[in-house]
Image (cartoon, grey):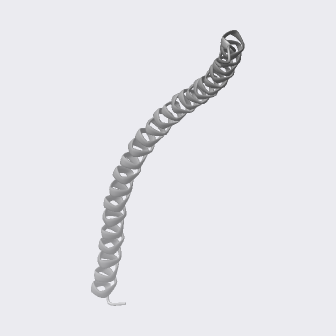
Amino acid sequence: MKDDRGELDLTKRIEELENSLSIALSINDKFQREDKDKSELISQLRQRVNELLAINKSHQNLMGRQIQENEELKKDNKALAKQIDDYFNVRMTNTRNSGM
């Protein structure tokens, strides 16, 4: 004898499919939220990288100016040291020539 539970089986199957669909939609929603969070994080990180690149460029320019200024100061220091040496050499020569 054949058991006729056709409508009952379909109702049960519909409930199973609705449950599966609900789970699938929930998972999809979760992944979409995670993707949105990741997209926001990526956007924030890109912005921070751009800020850091600008800071790096600024520091490179500043270091270039500092190196150039340091070289100029070294040249000035050498010139002043030579002037002082020349001054004392002239004074010593004059002192020796004057007989002191």
In the image, 30 versus 76, the foreground residue is 30
Q: Quadrant of residue 16?
A: top right
Query: In the orientation shown, which residue stands out farthest toward the front?
Result: 1
Q: Position of residue 75 (x, y in %)?
A: 31, 60
Q: Residue at x 27, y 85 (%)?
A: 97
In the image, 80 versus 17, the foreground residue is 17
Compared with 93, 54 (above or below) is above
Q: Position of residue 23 (x, y in %)?
A: 66, 25
Q: How many numbered dots are placed on residues in this image?
A: 0
**Left or right placement of residue 71 versus residue 2 in this view:** left
**Left or right placement of residue 52 versus residue 61 in this view:** right
Compared with 52, 36 (above or below) is above
Q: Position of residue 57 (x, y in %)?
A: 41, 39
**Left or right placement of residue 70 versus residue 21 in this view:** left
Q: Residue at x 70, y 18 (%)?
A: 12
Query: In the orientation shown, which residue stands out farthest toward the bottom?
Result: 100
Q: Quadrant of residue 13?
A: top right
Q: Position of residue 35 (x, y in %)?
A: 55, 28
Quadrant location, the C terminus: bottom left
Q: Quadrant of residue 15?
A: top right
Quadrant location, the N terminus: top right
Q: Residue at x 38, y 51 (%)?
A: 69
Q: Residue at x 52, y 28 (%)?
A: 43
Query: In the orientation shown, which residue stands out farthest toward the top?
Result: 7
In the image, 2 versus 69, the foreground residue is 2
In the image, 67 versus 95, the foreground residue is 67
